[in-house]
Amino acid sequence: MNVLLFNGSPRKRGNTEILLNAVAEGVRQAGGSVEVIRLCDLEINPCISCGSCNKTGKCVQKDDMMALYDKIDAARRMVIGSPIYFYGVTAQAKAFIDRTQALWCRKYLLKEKGGWPAGADRKGFFVSVAATKGSKIFEGAVLTAKYTYDAVDMDYGGELLVKGVDKRGEMSQALDDLQKAEAFGRRLLG
Ligand SMILES: Cc1cc2nc3c(=O)[nH]c(=O)nc-3n(C[C@H](O)[C@H](O)[C@H](O)COP(=O)(O)O)c2cc1C
């Protein structure tokens, strides 16, 4: 099974990237494959609330998000990774998420399903890192992720959250967390 991994961090060799790489390693250990998509390399405009998707279930904006709609529909497992920025996900991740509004419209307004077979087991996961250790640091972002997976018609499979990592690459020293990330990756396919 192929797993779609979206990285919402703009930082190359950053903590989200390192954590997602460990998740990807776990997926491969379990016999799966991965496609990693770095959102900041793509042109994904913010939703402009034009309302077209209310009637069609499709977005009128012609940018790199067009290809991602097809990938999301084809996927059975998907991961959104983002560092915490101001108690939420990054702007790049949020632009991507807001554009799934077209799929929310397809599901809830038009009552249509995507092209996958009825009863297909589709699951989405959230991976995040934050510099601080507050008890509520991931709350907003987890809610956003859960709502996104509802919009794209996937069950929420769970999250992997690491607190207290800030400097670029610091994640590579958190060996316990990286082991947990591999185990998380291995379980993703089940
Ligand atoms: C604009 C901005 C906002 C941030 N906001 C928060 C925050 O609200 N809480 C927090 O704990 N860390 C915050 N951080 C720190 C990042 O979550 C942290 O550095 C993380 O490890 C970055 O991951 P990355 O290397 O994958 O980009 C912020 C960082 C930036 C650049």
Image: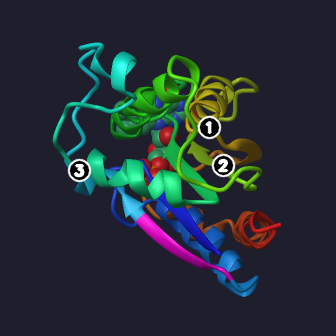
Task: Name the kind of residue labelled 1 in the image.
Answer: Tyr
Whichever of callouts 2 and 3 sits on the residue coming sooner in the sequence is 3
Image quadrant of residue 121? bottom right
Q: Residue furthest left?
A: 62
| Residue 132, horizontal then vertical, whole percent | 61, 35
Instruction: Residue 126: tell me if it is visible.
Output: yes
Residue that label 2 marks:
124
Label the magenta part by its dominant secondary structure. Answer: strand
Question: What secondary structure is marked by label 3?
Answer: loop
Q: Give percent across and percent down for residue 66.
A: 28, 47
| Amino acid at circle 3 | Asp
Indicate left or right for 188 with 7 as reference. right
Who is closer to the viewer here, 126 or 131? 126
Kindly identify the residue that appears in the image at 58 percent across and 27 percent down: 144
- Looking at the image, is 30 positioned above or below residue 114? below
Q: First in sequence: mark 3 or mark 1? A: 3
Tag 2: amino acid: Gly
Q: Which residues are magenta?
A: 32-36
Disc on the earlier residue, 1 or 2: 2
Q: Which residue is mark 3?
A: 64
Q: Which mark is residue 182?
A: none
Circles 2, 3 touching at the beta carbon (< 8 Å):
no
Q: Is residue 158 left or right of residue 150?
A: right
